[in-house]
Image: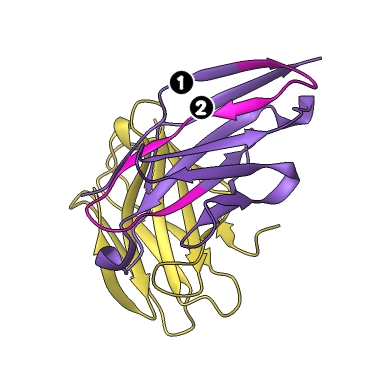
Chain colours: A purple, B yellow
Amino acid sequence: AQSVAQPEDQVNVAEGNPLTVKCTYSVSGNPYLFWYVQYPNRGLQFLLKYITGDNLVKGSYGFEAEFNKSQTSFHLKKPSALVSDSALYFCAVRDGPTDSWGKLQFGAGTQVVVTP
Amino acid sequence: DSGVTQTPKHLITATGQRVTLRCSPRSGDLSVYWYQQSLDQGLQFLIQYYNGEERAKGNILERFSAQQFPDLHSELNLSSLELGDSALYFCASSEDRGNTEAFFGQGTRLTVV
């Protein structure tokens, strides 16, 4: 069975500073990894994914994530945070080809607060 | 706009009642997923349909059921509702089975009183 851990309930960062949201995962096969963002009273919006290939994945709104197989991590990063990045961020994993029907397991979410 | 439409946006109902939540997936998407989001349980996968057939099942209660129709829209039926069923219910859709991202609707907020 797959699982995802987001060890921080909340991350606080000043505008203009780098932002990192941590995610570690556990799967039995090859992981398919995703990041989503949720703004208040909205659905989840897709940011980026790692399926295979280059370990550094670039996504929407200037976000990127690095897949690290040895550390089973997929941390989300942004070089310079904006106040508008304040939202709830979810990491999700699918157990690649062994769970090809697509069930996505989500982490508990990390609240990002960017202060001016 | 993700292209996934959920109705209604809000629903208030009494304990013991039955409700139906509706989801229209993005054009061309064959997979539909249902998730429940609550403060204490987080985002829980309920069930997935692919082209009309049930393909994966998560923590879905026996009081809950779902189906996907030939036009690919899906409905989630919740019966014998309890206070603890109050939550945000999301539908998501994707193109195929697994390696593509899912797109989420804005959710249905269910309040059971």
Q: CB under 8 Å between callouts 2 and 1?
A: yes
Which of the 4 image quadrants contains residue B54?
Answer: bottom left
First reached walking from the N terminus: tag 2 or tag 1: 1
**Residue B30 point in image, percent of width and height:** 46, 77
Q: Which residue is mark 2?
A: A110
- Residue at x 65% of width, y 59% of height: B2
- Residue at x 82% of width, y 14% of height: A116
Q: Which residue is mark 1?
A: A8
- Give the secondary structure at mark 1: loop
**Residue A75 point in image, percent of width and height:** 51, 36
Instruction: Write the start and end of the magenta stretch as one range.
Output: A12-34
B8 part of magenta stretch? no
Q: Is residue B90 above or below residue A73?
A: below
Instruction: Name the chain under label 1.
Output: A
In the rendered structure, which amino acid carries the disc numbered 1? Answer: Glu
Which of the 4 image quadrants contains residue B70?
Answer: bottom left
- Residue at x 52% of width, y 75% of height: B29
Can residue B8 be seen here?
no
- Give the secondary structure at mark 2: strand
Distance from label 2 to label 1 (Cα)?
A: 6 Å
Left or right: B73 as drawn, with respect to A107: right
